[in-house]
Amino acid sequence: MPPARKALNCLLCALLLCSPRAQADDSTLPRDSAWLLAANQARHLRDAAKFRFEMDNDIAFGSDNQFSNGWGLRIFTARAHSWDTLDGPPAWSLEFGKHFPGLNGAHLQVRTGFAVGQIINTPSDIERTELIENDVPYVGLLAGQMSWMAFSDLDLRAVEMTLGTLGQASLGEQGQNLIHSWTGSDIARGWANQVNDEVVFNLNYVSKDKITGSQTSGRNWDLALSRGWALGTIFTHVEAGLDIRFGRNMPGGFASTPEIMGRSISHDATLPPPIRNKGSLYGSLSLSANYFFHHLLLDGSLLSTRHGKWVERYKLIGTANLGFHYERPEWALHLQWVNTTDTVRVDELPNNGDKMNRFLSLMLEWKIQ
């Protein structure tokens, strides 16, 4: 079997094995698992075990340089009152949650998440076949993730592990050109110059605390402070930010945000809205500042044979994320726009049409039935 297909199959198998419903026929499930499925059907989306599919793309902005495309398929377990009562994930993962600092507390709810996903990064001129010296590198990343969340309506603590591969096994060329064939975009011809094959990993942590807000059956709003860090070969950075939500019948907890694999944590730290049998319609605005010590999509692979830097980049980058969210008891739709400050130095890239990262994110959630 080709290495690329083998890597993808391994990641998909790991996701399915960790799923709260790893077997398709309910009659073959142990009695306790069958009961869990029945119980899940009665839960609100924000309480239940669920799937989340995310697609991120910059096509709306007419530019392919830097972050070009990403997707992720994630499974979240149902919300539980403690790690000892959380059903679904392997026993070793529950022990990790129980012993990681900050993920325990009598007032905190817990859940875990499992994911596979891919991100694609390209220079500005994707029709050139030769190595482009003064632009960001071709990067494909295919990865699996596991996350742990402990939260209430007022605070959140989450940690996530990412393990993946760069190079040909990441299927970056195939993934980008498949999307481009669907959208009628130009085919990328420079993937022979992508970063070297490499196993990559990341450990990410985020904490959020609400500082004010109002949640009633009518109009809602809240304001939260966030901070976090990432350590690994994909991204290493520290961050601080501010999150605002506003709307009607908002769910408790914190809004979901897009994730570039290894860049941030795609958490599900939410609670049911005040009126459970009605829809929720709300907006969100997240503002953050990140100081990057290492940035794979701009610096290239740590094991790259290339001498010197790909581009001169800014270490401090600001990000704004504007989201619109509609949720029902069974499913949810999230549409978000992400925009950064300049990430690379303009005077070093005279032919680069876009010096910032901009993309739209579409996120769908539905209960496991």
Image: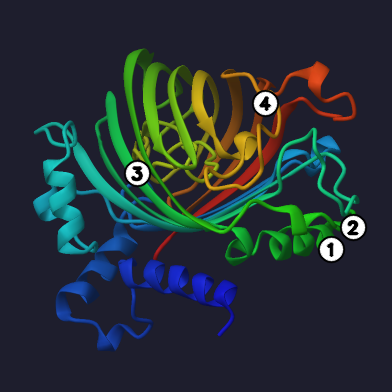
Name the kind of residue labelled 2 in the image.
Answer: Gly
Name the kind of residue labelled 4 in the image.
Answer: Asn
- Mark 2 and mark 1 in contact? Answer it, CB < 8 Å: yes
- Residue where numbered disc 4 is placed: 339
Q: Earlier in the sequence, mark 4 or mark 1?
A: 1
Q: Which mark is residue 184?
A: 2
- Mark 2 and mark 4 in contact? Answer it, CB < 8 Å: no
Which residue is at a point 34% across and 44% down the rendered structure image?
160
Q: Which mark is residue 160?
A: 3
Residue 129 image-quadrant placement: bottom right
Distance between mark 2 and mark 1 Cα atoms: 5 Å
- Mark 1 and mark 3 in contact? Answer it, CB < 8 Å: no
Foreground tag (3 vs 4): 3
Q: Earlier in the sequence, mark 2 or mark 3?
A: 3
Residue 73 position in % (x across, y down): 50, 58
Distance between mark 2 and mark 3 Cα atoms: 35 Å
Q: Quadrant of the C terminus?
A: bottom left
- Mark 2 and mark 3 in contact? Answer it, CB < 8 Å: no
Name the kind of residue labelled 1 in the image.
Answer: Ser
- Residue where numbered disc 1 is placed: 181
Distance between mark 1 and mark 3 Cα atoms: 33 Å
Badge 4 density bin: few <14, some 14–19, many ≥20, Cα 10 Å? some
Q: Quadrant of the N terminus?
A: bottom right
Badge 1 density bin: few <14, some 14–19, many ≥20, Cα 10 Å? few
Name the kind of residue labelled 3 in the image.
Answer: Glu
Q: Earlier in the sequence, mark 2 or mark 4?
A: 2
Instruction: For mark 2, give the secondary structure.
Output: loop
Residue 296 image-quadrant placement: top right
